[in-house]
Image (cartoon, rainbow, N blue to C red):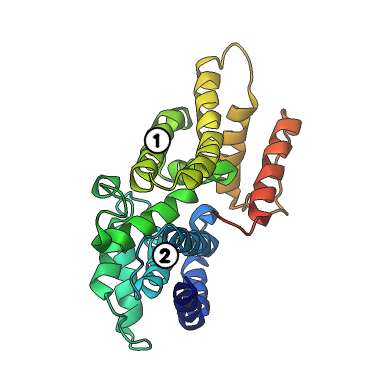
Amino acid sequence: MQALKQRIREAEEIWLLPLLNHCNNLFSEVFLPSHDHLHHYRVWCHAKDLMLLLAESGCSISPGLPQQLILAAFFHDTGLINTRDEKHGLESRRLCEEFFSRGDHRLPEGFPEILDAIAYHDDKSSMGRAITGEPDRQLLRLLSTSDDLDAFGYRGIYRYAEIYLCRMINPTELPGRILENLNNRFHNLKCIYEPLTHFIDRQEIRYWITCEFYLGLSEANAAAEERPDWKRELIRVFQDGINRKENLLKRERLLPKLEHEREIQQFFMLIDEENAINNHV
């Protein structure tokens, strides 16, 4: 365990600031707060915690994994600066190759595997069995799971809405599209990390926060003519924030005039509480 912690520290000493700054620069001209450099940092934090959790449970972690994972984490969604397509991982891989082609950094060990993990992190069909069953797929699975963990909870409610609205999905279609994706993520999480029951239990609570919101939104959409609902108004607030390029994940957000002010202010208070939590897993 101490050796793994030391390898994580070494990876961060070499890569954390350069990657964080590079990722911040890439997103500086793009409005996508749910997937910006802070998202990539959170994914890395999830990945660190997962590696330690797996090591504690007796799973073997390869010596090179921390360096490979920090690189994959900080590039996995960078392709979204150029395309909102679901296959943005291919563009993310290109941006990683471009970063190293400048010659400022030596190619890391396992570079082809890093590129593959970046390219296919969003392809849930490739996840397969438990993480203990195929050690050669650890990098891809850890990256994919760490990304999934940032889609749960109150912040996940915003993340899903923002990226789908940016893909020009009709707001009334959000529940169906999002719930299918969300359920796939949690199903894969349970399959891959089935032995880690306490971990699964903690993440299930966060999963249900996101799931119950979009189930409620589906019901609200069906009854839109009968009664107003704060969830529908919240989606309009999200769309307004996108139109105004207002980062609603920041505490200093500017909100429009609200009909359901109490419920929506409560939602953003819960977002702020999540953002203040440093322990990500």
Q: Is residue 93 left or right of residue 251?
A: left
Q: Is residue 124 left or right of residue 262?
A: left
Give percent across and percent down for residue 81. 42, 61
Residue ID for mark 2: 73
Give percent across and percent down for residue 17. 53, 78
Q: Can residue 162 be seen in this view?
A: no
Front-most of residues 171 and 152: 152
Rendered view: 158 above or below 14 = above
Residue ID for mark 1: 183
Rendered view: 81 above or below 211 = below
Front-most of residues 272 and 49: 49
Give percent across and percent down for residue 25. 50, 72
- The amino acid on which the numbered mark 2 sits, given as a three-letter code, is Ala
Q: Which residue is drawn at 46% across and 43% down?
A: 197
Q: Which residue is drawn at 54% across and 41% down?
A: 206
Q: In this view, does 260 lie to the left or right of 181?
A: right
Q: Residue at x 76, y 32 (%)?
A: 262
Q: Is residue 11 visible?
A: yes
Label 2 CA crowd tier, 10 Å (few <14, some 14–19, many 20+): many
Q: Which element carries disc 1, helix, strand or loop?
A: helix
Label 1 CA crowd tier, 10 Å (few <14, some 14–19, many 20+): some
Badge 2 or badge 1: first in the primary sequence: 2
Give percent across and percent down for residue 16. 50, 76
Outermost residue, right side: 262
What is the C-alpha distance between the residues marked 2 and 1?
22 Å
Q: Residue at x 60, y 29 (%)?
A: 231
- The amino acid on which the numbered mark 1 sits, given as a three-letter code, is Asn
Q: Residue 253 carries which label?
A: none
Rendered view: 135 above or below 274 = below
Rendered view: 22 above or below 91 = below
